[in-house]
Image: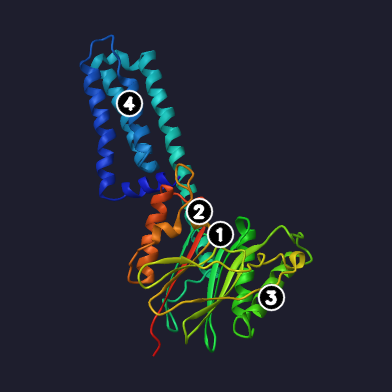
Amino acid sequence: MTRFVGLRRSARGGRGHALVALPIALVALVTVVDVFAPPDIHLGPLLVAAPAITAAFAGPWTTGLIAALAVAAQAVIAVLRDPDELFSANHQAQIAALILVGSCLVVFCVVRERRARELSQVRYVSEAAQRGVLRPLPKEIGPLRVASLYLAAEAEAEIGGDLYAAVRTSSGTRLIIGDVRGKGMTAVGDAALLLGAFRAAAHREATLVELVKYLDGSVCWSLSEPGETDRTGETFITAAVLDIPDEGSGISMVDCGHPPPVVRRGGGRVTTVEARQPAPPLGLGEVAHPDYHVDVFTFAVGDLLLLYTDGVIEARDSAGAFYPLVERIDGWQESSPEAFLRRLRRDLFDHVGGRLRDDVAMIAIERRPTG
């Protein structure tokens, strides 16, 4: 469907006029050859290829005109061969077949364009919803340089259950990145709920543990809300919540079943920050009764921190091999988070052959010198 939309759009430009010349040339060629061919050779049935080719890149009006041209060419062939043949059963059947096929192709083009408009509207609505739920992060947050990227697995609707957000506090920046189990609008609703709870509570919860407990309680309450299907224990959200102070070179993190962050040190060496005591994903608090542990790791000036969802490390190539994130980015020397994510995006798509099977969210953060 997307390929047809792209071809139709190109036909409206300069290349479209060149493409229309192809079926016209085909009609002219078949007509000339058929007229001068021996009487027992009939090439008129090949005229049906002209409107069929046109329907691949043009709209209903152009397809209808080429179909009419093919019908006229069939009549010309009959008259030039023998005027009496115009009313023969053979030529009448060929003309009727051309009219029938041309009409079907025109109807096909009309339906295709209507569906393309509907798809365009759906994409517009989904993108608007995505911008409302998953707001782009600013390029600068306090002493941090930030770049964020969201890639949806479904090309038709750029929306999913991956999430991220950042909130400024009096002493630093708090971030969250997460991934909702499941797909569709239910996952989007759960992501919106968690993001709303994080933005509301990140300012006032004194410690990182208290913030994560509040987020887990919000998700658990939503999953068992009256009037909704009880999804407790079945739906959960993996998340990493980080507290990055403006001063110093440390980061506090609570990992709730989320893939570990990666830090590129100043010399290009890459290390993975594994949580010593990772907690269960959010939404399982009433079942697992977690004990949240805060991990602290170094994040100095010039370092680059990469947060991501499992769509990155679970991306497979044609042979089924996962994307080796740490191995691929080891030694990269991009000068900014934006350039780093651009290269990572290209490298990820090269690995999977251009099509993702899962949504991907990434945040690249670099600490600048304070003052």
Label 1 or label 4, whichever lies nearer to me, is 1
Report the front residue among 150 and 339: 339
Work out whether 107 lies above or below 159. above
Residue beneath disc 4: 47
Marks 1 & 2, CB-CB < 8 Å contact: yes
- Residue at 51% from the left image edge and 50% from the top image edge: 357
Mark earlier in primary sequence (3, 2): 2
Q: Which kind of residue does numbered mark 1 sit on?
A: Gly
Ranked by sequence position, the earlier of labels 3 and 1 is 1
In the rendered image, residue 163, in percent from the top left (x then y), is placed at 55, 66
Report the Cα–Cα distance between label 3 and label 2.
31 Å
Residue found 67% across the figure and 73% down from its top: 292
The residue where tag 3 is placed is 213
Q: Is residue 12 left or right of residue 296?
A: left
Amino acid at the residue labelled 3: Lys
Q: x, y percentage for residue 313?
A: 50, 56
Question: To which residue does mark 2 refer?
Answer: 153
Q: Amino acid at mark 2?
A: Ala
Image quadrant of residue 105?
A: top left
**Quadrant of the frame with the N terminus:** top left
